[in-house]
Amino acid sequence: MAVNAQLVKELREKTGAGMLDCKKALEASDGDLDKAVDYLREKGIAKAAKKGSRVAAEGLASVVTDGNKAILFELNSETDFVAKNQEFLDLIDHVGQELIQGDAADLEAALALSVDGGTMADLIVKATARIGEKLDLRRYQRIEKTDAQVFGAYTHMGGKIASLAVLEGGDETVARDIAMHVAANNPNYLDESQVSQDVIDHERSVLRAEALNEGKPEAIVDKMVEGRLNKMLKEICLVHQPFVKNPDETVAQHVKAAGAQVVSFIRLEVGEGIEKKSEDFASEVQAQMNAA
């Protein structure tokens, strides 16, 4: 596969490595981005890019609870200006109430819900026409709990991040604190049991190559790798992370002291995975001057 400038740019954004290093990694990996990331990590040039593929997009995320039901969703707009507009904020509230009252299992069903004489999709199309920007209900999740469980809902930065924690036992205050922690620390998994063996094996392989390339004696490499692997797992698993309100205790220790246990969590951040066109006004002006 040919290595082009766009691939180099994507790899640089993922890893923070230099352009020449990115080009060399892509050439060595036959243009495969994931293999190129591993190549750079193995050479000690870049660490794991936890958030590398994220590109900002506008809009808001929201979480709504009602008894044993909860929903999280993301409604996108083209500009942040519109996302702060009162009409858009009212639309977010309206959509949230319709979603929590409906019984849609997934996004497709959510868009087909009956709303105001039409469907949810129709409602968003009409709002697009009124507001003057394309709006998109991009993500939706529905969660149900038992009577013995507790919801904790939290939104950050006015809705740029929405999170939900489900606890067995405890109360809403504790659950909301865990949702706040999830919003702030963005864990990948609840605990090690959710991490697939493929992920562990892959990470172990990369860490081993990285240690060898650092010149570490092979006799101690395996022990080092297991130590680094365990450290990585604690960093990405919610229950092992230092609790955001008290770093001297882990999340698991905090909820246990409250007589609770974390069952699950969900986190939505506006714009995850959406490519957003980068506007370079200075370059645009210079190009127009050169063409004149």
Image (cartoon, rainbow, N blue to C red):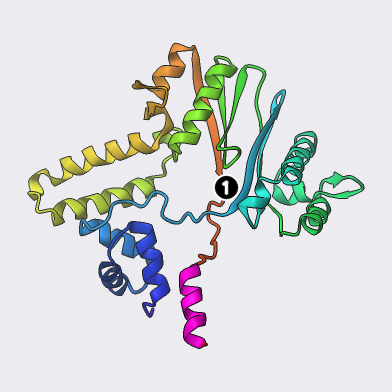
Please state the horizontal and vertical placement of residue 113, each as a whole percent of the image. Answer: 82, 46
Q: Nearer the viewer, residue 219 or 233?
A: 233
Please state the horizontal and vertical placement of residue 201, each as a whole percent of the image. Answer: 32, 49
Judging by the rendered image, the residue that carries numbered circle 1 is 270
Q: Residue furthest right?
A: 117
- Is 194 displayed left or right of 227 in the figure? right
Q: Nearer the viewer, residue 138 or 108?
A: 138
- Is 222 displayed left or right of 71 in the figure? left
Please state the horizontal and vertical placement of residue 76, each as a whole percent of the image. Answer: 65, 52
Is 14 one of the magenta-colored residues? no
Q: Residue at x 38, y 45 (%)?
A: 197
Q: Which secondary structure lies at badge 1? A: loop
Q: Residues within 10 Å of mark 1 (few under 14, many from 20)?
A: many
Q: Residue at x 50, y 56 (%)?
A: 55
Q: Residue at x 42, y 22 (%)?
A: 245
Residue 138 seen by the camera: no
- Is 250 displayed left or right of 150 in the figure? left
**248 is higher (above) or lower (below) than 15:** above
Screen quadrant of the N terminus: bottom left
Residue 82 seen by the camera: yes
Residue type indicated by callout 1: Val
Q: Residue furthest bottom?
A: 292
**120 is higher (above) or lower (below) than 14:** above
Q: Nearer the viewer, residue 8 or 151?
A: 8
- The magenta-colored residue range is 280-291
